[in-house]
Amino acid sequence: MAKWMTLAALAAVAISGCTPARMNYAPSDQRGYAQRPVVSESLFKSDQKIVSNEAIRSILNGRIELPDDCNVAVVQLHNGYFVRRAGREAAYLDALVGDLKKSEKVAGVTQIPDLLLPVAASVPKLREAAARLQCELILVCRINNRMNYRNRFLRKDTAKVRSSAEGLLIHTRTGIVPFTAVIDEEHKNTEKRADATEWDFSERASTEATLCAMSTLGRSVKTFLDKGKPVEPRQQGGRCP
């Protein structure tokens, strides 16, 4: 009996240690694929209910011109909805548009009021809201933070926040997205005397990391508008002070 149990245990270990086979599939790997006729547009009717093949063709073959003197409407999203942390949203917005306002191509920046947007803001609704505000561009942004918190005995606690700021510009007239950016910033922080609790410290660390990432994102958008191209990748990310 013991022998059978030993063999069963060894078999279980062997099975658990096996790596399951992964199957990769690509139609182009099949024999004779290169001799098939070329399909140059969608033949799925459901696709064309959203955007027709003719419209897709015009969009891909065309280009847009960014206005020289434009107004930018800003909306800040968080997990599909708007960030609402009393007093902080205004600070986040200021960090985002501080440098953006200095662009020679930006006449003004405004935040889209909630009254103009539904709970689930789609691109068509954003375009409609921006048109009502007479803004030629829409800047949509979202922040995601990941924190590594360390409790240290008889020493001040530390926190390292990895803040990721996603942003994209939407051309109000066409709905085309001419620019996207993902900014990753690492922010290290140490507990201060003013932090009454661990919650206060973690909230402060998260806020400071968000402000840093939003400021970097704003500079990236400004550089794109001024120079017509995004910032070099090595200049986007980095470490916050």
Image: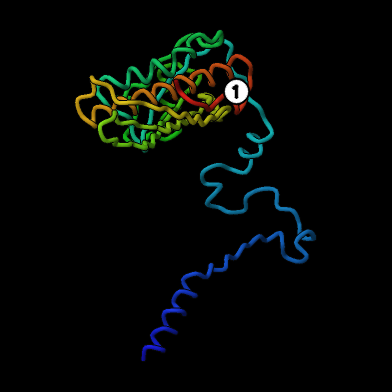
Could you say where residue 33 lies in the image, as x and y percent from the top left? 75, 61
Q: Mark 1 points at which residue?
A: 231
In the image, farthest residue toward the front: 154
* Relative side of 12 to 44, left or right: left
Q: Quadrant of the N terminus?
A: bottom left
Question: Residue at 40% across / 31% down in the picture?
Answer: 143
x%, y% of residue 230?
Answer: 60, 24
Label 1: state its secondary structure.
Answer: loop
From this view, report whether residue 159 is shown above or below residue 133. Answer: below
**76 and 59: which is toward the camera:** 76
Displayed quadrant of residue 7: bottom left
- Say which residue appears at 41% left-offset and 89% top-offset: 3
Residue 131 in sight in this render: no
For this rendering, which residue is in front, 34 or 84?
A: 84
Q: Residue at x 70, y 52 (%)?
A: 39
- Which residue is the extreme one toward the bottom? 1
- 223 left or right of 202 in image: right
For the residue carrying disc 1, how many other residues have a C-alpha within 10 Å: few (<14), some (14-19), or many (20+)? Answer: some
Percent x, y for residue 72?
47, 17
Q: Is residue 53 above or below residue 115?
A: below
Image x and y of residue 34, in percent: 78, 59
Q: Can residue 49 be seen in this view?
A: yes
How many numbered discs, if any? 1
Q: What residue type is labelled 1?
A: Val
Colour scheme used in the picture?
A: rainbow
